[in-house]
Image (cartoon, grey):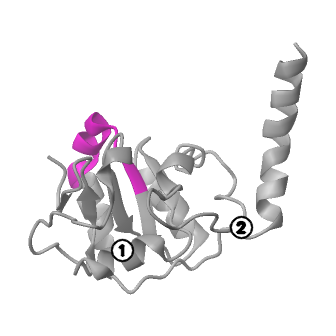
Amino acid sequence: MIAIRLATLLLTALPAFVGAADLEVIHDGAGAVPAGIYYGHLVSGVDQAGVLPGTKFPLTTRLKPGVLSVDARGEGLFDAHWMAHPIFVLGTDPGSFQWLQQHRQTLGALGASGLVIEAGSETLFKDLQAFAGGLSVAPVRGPWLEQRLLSAGISTYPLVVMPDGRITKAPM
């Protein structure tokens, strides 16, 4: 009973602590994984008043909206053994909304989580989150994903990273 009360206290106090400081990279070497797909489930509710505490808008990226020209293997992009399901990367541009509408059902069937790499405002992010129809969608905080994609020669989004590390323009 005491453990349940302590867990409840910690979970209710967590948002206050999360908003108090910027995120800090603890480890960025071999075996490091982005936390976005994990906290995406925490911020996926469209009924939440805001986004993740501390997220600053606009979210910007050097990647551009477009169509991925060829599927890539993603060698060195991700150590795919940690991926339990696909992740999709998109923005709040009209092309991303259209792409999401076209692939929403398949993404849901695959259990995919979304990472938003570009959003002009919190309102645009929340609009995309609502449009996702229950799919987990989280804002990308920090340059990790952008740097990995650019170093792999990928400069456009939306895209999907499959659990085997393959990067595609559409979920399969």
Residue nearest the viewer, comparing 100 with 147: 147
Q: Position of residue 12 (x, y in %)?
A: 82, 39
- Residue 48 horizontal side relative to residue 145, left or right: right
Residue nearest the viewer, comparing 57 with 115: 115
Amino acid type of the residue that numbered disc 2 sits on in the rendered structure: Gly
The boundaries of the magenta stretch are 102-114
Q: Confirm whether the magenta stretch covers residue 104.
A: yes
Quarter of the image where one finds residue 13: top right
Report the disc number at residue 54.
2
Classed neighbour count for the residue bearing mark 1: other residues with Cα under 10 Å, few (<14), some (14–19), many (≥20)? some
Mark whose residue sits in front, 1 or 2: 1
Q: Residue furthest front?
A: 30
Question: Could you tell me if residue 165 is visible in this image?
Answer: yes
Q: Position of residue 60 (x, y in %)?
A: 48, 82
Quarter of the image where one finds residue 108: top left
Q: In the displayed structure, would residue 105 be above or below residue 63?
A: above
> For numbered disc 1, what is the local secondary structure?
helix
Q: Position of residue 82 (x, y in %)?
A: 38, 46
Amino acid type of the residue that numbered disc 1 sits on in the rendered structure: Arg
